[in-house]
Amino acid sequence: MNKYIIRVILIYLTLIVSQGLAQDNWEYRSNYEIIFSTTEDIDFKIKPKFWFNGMINDIYSSDVEIGVDKKLNKWLSVSPYYRHIVLFKENDKLTEYRPQVDVTVNQKVRDISFQSRNRLEYRIRESNNSFRYRNKLTIKLPDIFDKGFRLSLSEEPFFDCKKREIDKNRVYANFSFPLKNNFTIDLFYILEHAKKDDNWNYVNVFGTTLKYRI
């Protein structure tokens, strides 16, 4: 059963990557995460992020998320966060204030983990305030070589509650592996497509997330 699921996932991933490589637009996203466990069931997190057009030559977004993950039981958690975003457009800066809350459901079938993260965010911007709902479904494959190396695949549609439509979608492939001294690094690829003026624009994203647990 596990081998069948893994084969289907790898075929799906190959199709997605093939579609992405046909596009010309590329970005690099550099993410960081500092984790402090206040209790066994509560993690306090700070997540700075820096996003670039091209490959580290033109920053267009800088933001930070601050919040907590609260595990209610082995399959359910809730995570209130605040995200402060600064967008750089030509000679101007645009700021977005974004309170958000996640409700995450976790299940496991043999060695394969399934996660559904449901996020409701309120986007406070200078010209337009709106709610948005995001559902990120993630499949985590078994550890590779029993060393903590792990591949996960996700898809995340974005639903604009004001427009009442899905106007963005992301497909993720993430490879995570542990380092020494409580560090973990993630290497990820995202195929992102967003709707603008009734047209869908595609972008390939390569990125890294460096995590440190205090």
Image: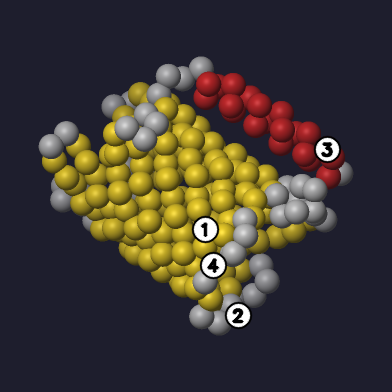
Pinpoint residue 88: horizontal percent, then vertical percent. 22, 41
Q: Which SS class for mark 4?
A: strand
In the rendered structure, are the residues bearing label 2 and label 3 in contact, judged by CB atoms less than 8 Å apart?
Answer: no
Return the disc, 2 or 4, that comes first in the chain's sequence: 2
The mark closer to the camera, 4 or 3, is 4
Q: CA distance from mark 1 to mark 2?
A: 18 Å
The mark closer to the camera, 2 or 3, is 2
Which amino acid type is shown beneath numbered disc 4? Arg
Is residue 132 visible from the viewing direction of this image? yes
Along the line of sight, the residue nearer the viewer: 165 or 55? 55
Which residue is painted at 46% across and 20% down in the image? 23
**Which residue does the numbered mark 3 point to in the structure image?**
4
**Which residue does the numbered mark 4 point to in the structure image?**
213
**Which residue does the numbered mark 1 point to in the structure image?**
211
Counting other residues with Cα less than 10 Å from the Cα at mark 4, is it few (<14), some (14-19), or many (20 or more)? Answer: some
Disc ID at residue 40: 2
Q: Which SS class for mark 3?
A: helix
21 horizontally vs 81: left or right: right
The mark closer to the camera, 1 or 2, is 1
Q: CA distance from mark 4 to mark 3?
A: 35 Å
Q: CA distance from mark 1 to mark 3?
A: 32 Å
Which amino acid type is shown beneath numbered disc 1? Lys
Quadrant in the rendering for residue 117: bottom right
